[in-house]
């Protein structure tokens, strides 16, 4: 057990840091758009080899998770979690990306569909890889801080690649890990963002962050984010389905309070596009329902952990 | 970063388990039913802790120079993780290993260490913690129990309350006010048989025999029993509290109790087909695991010799989360196990419940932990 980064892990993240620093600022069009995707960041990550590390022998899913976790510090989004944590477990190497995970019925708006090359879809006990025709996708306006799209016409599933029923539990496990990594970091960013705000904002002659109710709820948010991040990283490290379900459950059950408290303490500012808060909170919101949501994942924890 | 147990630690855990299996008395369930604060368990605890000591397992994580085995802080945690779910066979002596020993090793004089450490290392002494007073719990520095230096002795007058295990203890780690400033605190290591000490147990909703009032009426304590410097006791206290916050592996108590609860529900046929109970059980486990990792981070820092941090308070906060979820689970899905005679004689569930109900109060209230995290870790400004 060691919570410090190894020298290889540190070197990996040090290599990533300058790219992230260059994309720290969210461009104005991103702030005002409901479909913003940071193509520049995606390209830079790809060029730097960071989206291929799942196929690099020295690296394990933990390092992939650390990369996703680090990218999650940015207000802009790129599809890295599925590429790094889910797709390598179910698709042959060299798969085209970005990859989207179909959540709910196929005709519903889907996260990352406007940029996706492949959609992974659980259908009739099999896992299908659907090649996405960009002309068959329209943008879907959503409140969630990811680009959403829907199929204009349902794709022909006979043309999809059948990956096999044995891939379903694998997909589910790694989807849980991926969503937990993203959610944990989004929770932490929302809390940190709010901590900075309440330190500066003065009301009633004192800093807002000096009121105990604000302090305690942020301390709780800080604790939840930490728990969520460590559970997610452990699940990536252990490749254990119980750990994966545990991580997803823990993140999802704490999203609601974290989202509420962080918005609450930013007051009206948190609702405006001036502020970046909603990019993290509405990312959390999107992740809150995936893979069965808090209830479904908690049931999965029970079924996996108490199976014997 | 990695989350695995090295081979040596896995072996250490196996060894601890095998010693528990070998040395726990056959009538342990019966003994433990009297509770951790009972004379029965304290007596059995002495025998058991003595055996652990002989095996070199009690203070394996202490430095060799102080009588330990130069082990890792991880070994301390592994020991606790194995002890607590079995009802803590060391009895109240767990405190010696958790916070008292570390405070003595850091702050006691060489002569004091020679006197006080050997019985702890041998598993043959019970200490109690004499901190809280009626008007000084969370606001510990408001304590009133006074010590006045008279020649080579301190004369102590006042009262402590809530003291766990007081009537079983031979020694007390006593905080006294010794000067006019708020933090003029002097620590005395006091023989609990000293003339002038009166101990009164009082009942409570934690296990029987846990809580006491301790009165000091002109109790004389020789200056050689003062820990660290006069009026500078706050420093060792803060150090000890930091150790105490993660001293009890509450996530493990709850984790194991949860497995026991589900076993019982499965036996009754009310678990496997009910997604509602499964959901609630999954949430308890998730909170346990978060608390485990947050606590492990503190151990990892100790293992890397980093200074104590507020992370111990985050860990303490996380313990409250899993305890609340578990207690809610039990009272929702199997309230009958909380009755005096648990169904099926399943004492562990009711014990886990009653032992943990005060976990957000004892060893520093939850809100105090939140304050520490908010101001010292998040850097939020102190209130008006
Ligand atoms: C089972 C049990 C065993 C114990 N064992 C020992 C022992 O062995 N030795 C010993 O010395 N003490 C012991 N204690 C005492 C324990 O440390 C105190 O109960 C604890 O520090 C709280 O103090 P208090 O009870 O005086 O509550 P108070 O200090 O009166 O606080 C009451 C409540 O007020 C709230 N509160 C307090 N301060 C603040 C604040 N700054 N901001 C917001 N809210 C606040 C908290 O919710 C707190 O629980 C034990 C207590 C229990 C319940």
Image (cartoon, rainbow, N blue to C red):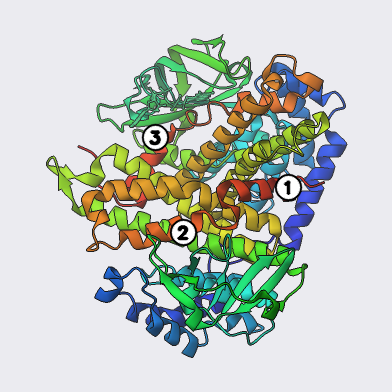
Q: Quadrant of the C terminus of chain B?
A: top left
**With B301 as the anchor, is A304 left or right in this view?**
right
- How much space separates mark 3 and mark 1, taking CA atoms? 35 Å
Q: Camera-side residue: B93 or B112?
A: B93
| Mark 1 secondary-structure assignment | helix
Q: Are marks 3 and 1 in contact (CB under 8 Å)?
A: no
Q: Camera-side residue: B301 or A86?
A: A86
Q: Is residue A134 above or below residue B367?
A: below
Q: Name the residue located 51 percent from the left edge and 78 percent from the top edge.
A: A116
Label 1: which residue? A303
Pointer 2 residue Cβ closer than 8 Å to ligand 1: no
Q: How many marks?
A: 3
Q: Position of residue B347 (x, y in %)?
A: 74, 23
Q: Name the residue located 42 percent from the left edge and 27 percent from the top edge.
A: B175
Pointer 3 residue Cβ closer than 8 Å to ligand 1: yes
**With B102 as the anchor, is A146 left or right in this view?**
left
Pointer 1 residue Cβ closer than 8 Å to ligand 1: no
Q: Quadrant of ligand 1?
A: top left
Quadrant of the image occupied by residue A84: bottom right
Q: Position of residue A42 (x, y in %)?
A: 44, 82
| Mark 3 secondary-structure assignment | helix
Q: Quadrant of the N terminus of chain B?
A: bottom right
**Do discs 3 and 1 share a chain?**
no
Q: Which mark is residue A286?
A: 2
Label 3: which residue? B367
Q: Name the residue located 37 percent from the left edge and 23 percent from the top edge.
A: B136
Q: Is residue A171 above or below residue B351?
A: below
**Do discs 1 and 2 share a chain?**
yes
Q: Name the residue located 35 percent from the left edge and 23 percent from the top edge.
A: B143
Q: Are marks 3 and 2 in contact (CB under 8 Å)?
A: no
| Mark 2 secondary-structure assignment | helix
């Amino acid at each position: 057990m060691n919570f410090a980064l190894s020298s290889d892990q540190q070197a990996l993240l040090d290599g990533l840091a300058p790219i992230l620093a260059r994309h720290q600022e969210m461009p104005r069009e991103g702030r005002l758009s409901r479909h913003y995707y940071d193509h520049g960041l995606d390209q830079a990550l790809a060029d730097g080899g960071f989206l291929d590390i799942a196929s690099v022998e020295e690296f394990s899913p933990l390092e992939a998770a650390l990369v996703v976790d680090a990218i999650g510090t940015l207000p802009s989004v790129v599809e890295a979690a599925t590429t790094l944590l889910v797709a390598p477990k179910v698709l042959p190497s060299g798969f085209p990306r970005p990859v989207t995970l179909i959540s709910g019925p196929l005709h519903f708006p889907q996260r990352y569909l406007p940029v996706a090359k492949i959609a992974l879809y659980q259908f009739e006990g099999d896992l299908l890889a659907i090649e996405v025709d960009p002309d068959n996708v329209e943008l879907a306006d959503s409140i969630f801080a990811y680009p959403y799209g829907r199929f204009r016409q349902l794709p022909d599933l006979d043309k999809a690649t059948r990956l096999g029923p044995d891939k379903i539990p694998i997909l589910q496990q790694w989807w849980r890990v991926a969503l937990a990594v993203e959610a944990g970091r989004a929770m932490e960013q929302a809390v940190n963002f709010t901590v900075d705000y309440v330190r500066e904002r003065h009301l009633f002659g004192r800093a807002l962050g000096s009121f105990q109710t604000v302090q305690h709820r942020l301390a709780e948010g800080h604790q939840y984010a930490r728990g969520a991040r460590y559970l997610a990283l452990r699940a990536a490290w252990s490749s254990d389905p119980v750990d994966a379900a545990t991580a997803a459950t823990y993140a999802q059950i704490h999203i609601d309070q974290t989202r509420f408290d962080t918005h609450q303490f930013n007051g009206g500012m948190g609702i405006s596009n001036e502020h970046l808060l909603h990019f993290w909170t509405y990312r959390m919101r999107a992740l809150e329902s995936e893979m069965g949501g808090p209830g479904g994942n908690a049931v999965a924890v029970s079924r996996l952990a108490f199976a014997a | 970063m990695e989350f695995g147990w090295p081979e040596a630690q896995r072996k250490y855990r196996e060894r601890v388990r095998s010693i528990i299996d070998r040395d726990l008395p056959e009538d342990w369930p019966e003994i433990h039913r009297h509770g951790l604060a009972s004379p029965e368990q304290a007596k059995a605890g002495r025998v058991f802790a003595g055996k652990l000591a002989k095996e070199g397992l009690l203070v394996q994580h202490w430095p060799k120079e102080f009588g330990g085995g130069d082990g890792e802080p991880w070994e301390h945690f592994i020991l606790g993780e194995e002890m607590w779910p079995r009802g803590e066979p060391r009895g109240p002596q767990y405190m010696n290993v958790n916070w008292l020993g570390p405070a003595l090793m850091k702050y006691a004089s060489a002569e004091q260490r020679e006197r006080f450490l050997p019985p702890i290392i041998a598993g043959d002494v019970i200490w109690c913690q004499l901190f809280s007073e009626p008007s000084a719990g969370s606001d510990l520095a408001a304590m009133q129990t006074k010590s006045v230096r008279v020649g080579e002795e301190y004369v102590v007058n006042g009262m402590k309350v809530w003291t766990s295990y007081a009537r079983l203890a031979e020694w007390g780690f006593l905080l006294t006010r010794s000067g006019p400033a708020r933090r003029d605190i002097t620590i005395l290591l006091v023989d609990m048989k000293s003339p002038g000490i009166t101990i009164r147990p009082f009942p409570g909703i934690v296990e029987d025999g846990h809580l006491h009032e301790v009165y000091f009426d002109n109790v004389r304590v020789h200056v050689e029993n003062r820990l660290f410097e006069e009026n500078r006791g706050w420093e060792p206290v803060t150090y000890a509290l930091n150790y105490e916050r993660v001293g009890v592996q509450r996530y493990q108590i709850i984790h194991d109790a949860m497995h026991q609860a589900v076993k019982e529900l499965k036996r009754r046929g009310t678990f496997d087909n009910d997604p509602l109970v499964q959901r609630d059980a999954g949430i308890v486990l998730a909170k346990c695991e978060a608390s485990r990792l947050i606590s492990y981070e503190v151990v990892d820092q100790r293992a890397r010799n980093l200074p104590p941090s507020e992370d111990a308070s985050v860990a303490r906060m996380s313990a409250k989360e899993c305890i609340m979820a578990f207690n809610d689970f039990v009272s929702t899905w199997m309230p009958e196990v909380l009755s005096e005679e648990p169904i099926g004689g399943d004492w562990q569930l009711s014990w886990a419940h009653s032992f943990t109900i005060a976990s957000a109060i004892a060893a520093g209230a939850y809100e105090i932990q939140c304050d520490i995290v908010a101001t010292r870790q998040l850097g939020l400004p102190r209130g008006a």
